[in-house]
Image (cartoon, helix red, strand yellow):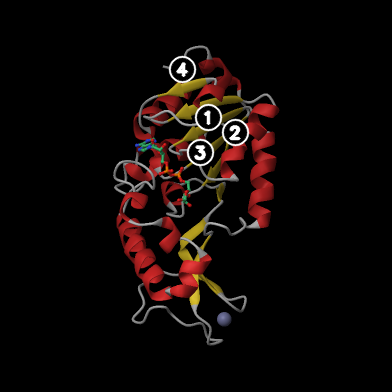
Amino acid sequence: MFGSVAAKIKDAEKIVFVTGAGISQESGISTFRGKDGYWRRYDPMQLATIEAFYENPKLVWEWYEDRRRTILAARPNAGHTAIAELAKYKEVIVLTQNIDGLHQRAGSRNVYELHGSIIRIKCTACTFVENITSGFDVLPPKCVCGSILRPDVVWFGEPLPQHVWADAIMHAQSCDVMVIAGTSLLVSPANSLPFYAKQNGATLIEVNPERTVMSDEMDLSLRQTSAAILPQLVSLFK
Ligand code: APR
Ligand code: ZN
């Protein structure tokens, strides 16, 4: 399975995972661009942009509430659990584009949410931020200051949380192995993380049933699902 890269994994001190919607697909959460993907049914420009939100906050809130219900009902899968377990053997950092919180629910500690979190909301005007655990009677919900609240996620055209992005680059530049699992690597700047790792001599491993735009840059591409592959990566240490 891992061939000559197995030694690199075993010798690695620090392993960074860059994950995307594909790692949560086996938890029953749709990807964005796969055959069952969200963007097949919805136009991302209608739902995941700040303009769409201000044009129709109720529609955007309804979409996120629907996704949040699916996500809260979902459970971490063997891929998430394997990454959490690997931290017993190595320094593991998770740089995820996902907003579903499943890495944390699987037990991973060092998780950086590059695109925010669907269970966190913030005010469009003041500094109010809060984790939410229940639904809302009225959409869009209002802040105590009177402004409307929004999901604390990064929409197309918005910058990533600066401190999160700076840390993500630092970790990408200082890892021995980077495992890129379940992402099409089509969205920037997250898709630049493998370049930072490669520039610093890291071994790149892709876990994706399909090819991606960066497959040719990888030291190893494993064409299976993350729930199938990642437990086998952990078993290298057992
Ligand atoms: N295991 C591993 N990979 C999988 C699996 C699986 N079970 N199922 C699908 N994949 C792969 C697909 O082949 C695809 O390459 O996961 C990838 C999912 O790609 P996208 O749907 O583009 O999701 P992602 O890369 O996370 O999108 C990045 O785009 O829409 C924005 O903000 C959103 O964070 C998201 C960002
Ligand atoms: Zn407010």
Is label 2 or label 4 in front?
A: 2
Is label 4 or label 1 in front?
A: 1
Label 1 with label 2: CB-CB less than 8 Å: yes
The residue lying furthest to the top in this view is: 4
- The Cα–Cα distance between marks 3 and 2, rounded to whole angstroms, is 9 Å
Left or right: 61, with 157 as reference point: left
Left or right: 197, with 118 as reference point: right
SS under mark 2: helix
Is label 3 or label 4 in front?
A: 3
Residue matched to label 1: 214
- The Cα–Cα distance between marks 4 and 1, rounded to whole angstroms, is 19 Å
Mark number, residue 235: none
SS under mark 3: loop
Residue matched to label 2: 194
Q: Identify which residue, 67 or 73, lies in the foreground.
A: 67
Residue matched to label 3: 185
Q: Residue at x 52, y 71 (%)?
A: 130
Mark 1 or mark 4, which is nearer the start of the sequence?
Answer: 4
Quadrant containing the N terminus in the rendered view: top left
Q: Check disc 4 and give the amino acid type.
A: Phe
Mark 4 or mark 2, which is nearer the start of the sequence?
Answer: 4
Q: Check disc 3 and give the amino acid type.
A: Leu
